[in-house]
Image: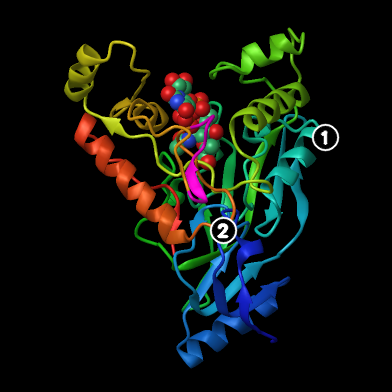
Amino acid sequence: MQFELNKPLKDFNTFHIEAHAEKLICIEDEASLLETVAFAKKEKINTHFIGGGSNILLTKNVQGIVVINQLKGIKIIQENEEFVMVNFSSGENWHECVLWAVEHNYGGIENLSLIPGTIGASPIQNIGAYGVELKDVFHSLEAIHLTSFEKKIFTLEECQFGYRDSIFKQQEKGNWFILNVTLQLTKNPVCNINYGNIKDELLKMNIEYPSIQDVSKAVIQIRSSKLPNPAEIGNAGSFFKNPIVSHSHFEELKSLYPEIPFFTVSNGVKIPAAWLIEKNNWKGFKEGDYGVHKNQALVLVNYNNAKGNDILNLSTQIITSVQQAFNITLEREVNIW
Ligand code: EPU
């Protein structure tokens, strides 16, 4: 077990924030993972796990051990004429797995193209985009308990998926390391193109009867035009969740702002946080090296050498202003370290 000491984390987080890990180790197999967590337990050292580093904001150096998950592998474990069950190791890059599925004409995750991060992170916040969420194709996952080292299969029900939420963000937070995720994909894909501007994008591409390859291309096109590429501008995708308000609160807002966009959901009305933030004039805001992206107000950005705390403070100012203007409390989607 070889740790790198005082290791810069700039390349391990998509915000590209400069912070150091006291000890860092990349693990490529289960045995090294077990050895590392057993060592940390014995020595009473904190461990922190990073997959793609695309949903964290580093506000200080990280004490203890940072484990970089590089468990790799894609295996078909069962198939019939209609479905294929594919097991993906948790250190695989999510988008590369989507491209693999699309190439094989296995449908179900094409709308989730170009989401940054790893397979292992995908169930934690039940990633979602363009009308599809991970839970729609999720079969099960295998995880290892970080103190008892017990291995367990979590079924769809046991994961308790919600909007950007799962049991791994609630009562089981920090307790498990996800080893692999099994998705049930279809061999007879039906494209889901009802969300937002997917149809328009396909029309622009002159496609009337899209394949999943076309849908994937359209989503890649939409995301690339709206969302900054983390390789060029540091960011972690949506910084906030879209809030859900009561019907009566929504009616009040609608009478003041008839143009307010919304989606009715089972427990109320969901309002795009980006609209609330833009309405408060934050879109395109820039100070020093940090700001709010010019094409998508939900995305906070590091233009060069911003500090994690600059971005955290900016997010607090945004939360306060949205609270004052609309009486809505935005919740951060990104994890603050
Ligand atoms: N809007 C604005 N200003 C903006 C951007 C959007 O007013 O700057 C309004 C528009 O009315 C637009 C509506 O917000 O119609 C919805 O915008 P968009 O389709 O871009 O989606 P979103 O609600 O802002 C969510 C996800 C994204 C996901 C898209 C597409 C959350 C927190 N974010 O954003 O996820 O890609 O839908 O499905 O739910 C991510 O999690 O990192 C992420 C990018």
> Mark 1 against mark 2, which lies toward the viewer?
2
Q: Which residue is mark 1?
A: 103
Location of residue 12 by image quarter: bottom right
**Pointer 1 or 2: first along the chain:** 1
Q: Which mark is residue 95?
A: none
Question: Is 239 part of what is drawn in magenta?
Answer: no
User: In the rendered structure, which segment of residues is drawn in magenta?
Assistant: 288-296
- The residue positioned 56% from the left and 74% from the top of the image is 20
Q: Is mark 2 within 8 Å of ligand 1?
A: no
Is 147 situated above or below 286?
Answer: below
| In-front residue for pair 208/86 | 208
Decide if residue 12 is on the left or right side of residue 245: right
Secondary structure of the residue carrying tag 1 is helix
| In-front residue for pair 192/281 | 281
| In-front residue for pair 221/171 | 221
Q: Amino acid at mark 2?
A: Asn
Q: Which residue is mark 2?
A: 305
Decide if residue 326 is on the left or right side of residue 114: left
